[in-house]
Image (tube, rainbow, N blue to C red):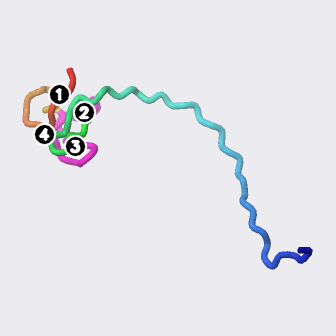
Amino acid sequence: MTEAPRRPILKLKTTPKPPEAAPVAVPAQSAPQWKCKPCGAAFFVADDLAPEDAVRCVSCGARLGKAEDFRSGSGKVRARRIGG
């Protein structure tokens, strides 16, 4: 076992870990307010959507209606309100 190896032994380079960044405050999301009719997944409609923006299910991708229809309570939407 005194022979030199035929190939050099590979070593992993260890890099120092970057300093941890301060945690970013994430705004709390409200509880799900709607339930998708096609798949049954719960979701909420973001307040920053423009009224003409389409709302899609996060689970199945179905187009559920326009943001203004969800906010006004009238209009044809493919979702059901849950809770309060």
x, y percent for residue 59: 27, 45
Where does the image place residue 22, in percent across and percent down from the top left? 58, 31
Amino acid residing under circle 4:
Arg
Q: Nearer the viewer, residue 68 or 82?
A: 82
Q: Quadrant of residue 36?
A: top left
Hey, what amino acid is under mark 2?
Val
Whether pointer 4 and pointer 2 mark residues with C-beta atoms closer than 8 Å, the reply is no
Please name the residue that numbered disc 1 is placed on.
71
- What residue did someone put label 2 on? 45
What is the spatial separation of the Cα atoms under label 2 and label 1, in whole angstroms? 8 Å
Marks 4 and 2, how far apart at CA: 13 Å
Which amino acid type is shown beneath numbered disc 3? Arg
Asked whether the beta carbons under mark 2 and mark 3 sit within 8 Å of each other, the answer is no
Residue depicted at x 54% and y 31%: 23
Front residue of 79/22: it is 79
Disc 4 crowd rating (10 Å Cα; few below 14, some 14-19, many 20+) is: some
Task: Please tell me how crowded label 2 is: few (under 14), some (14-19), or many (20+) other residues with Cα within 10 Å.
Answer: some
Q: Are marks 2 and 1 in contact (CB under 8 Å)?
A: yes
- Camera-near label (4 vs 3) is 4
Sequence-first tag of 2 and 3: 2
Please tell me whether residue 51 belongs to the stretch shown in magenta.
yes
Q: Identify the residue at image location x=21%, y=32%.
A: 34
Q: Does label 2 or label 1 sit earlier along the sequence?
A: 2
Disc 2 to disc 3, C-alpha distance: 9 Å
In terms of image quadrants, where is residue 68?
top left
SS category of the residue bearing label 4: loop
Q: Position of residue 2 (x, y in %)?
A: 92, 74
Category of crowding for the residue at label 1, using alpha-carbon neighbours closer than 10 angstroms: few (below 14), some (14–19), many (at least 20): few
Does 45 sit above or below residue 84?
below
Is 13 in front, or is 72?
A: 13
Q: Which residue is mark 4?
A: 78
Task: Give the residue at mark 3.
Answer: 56
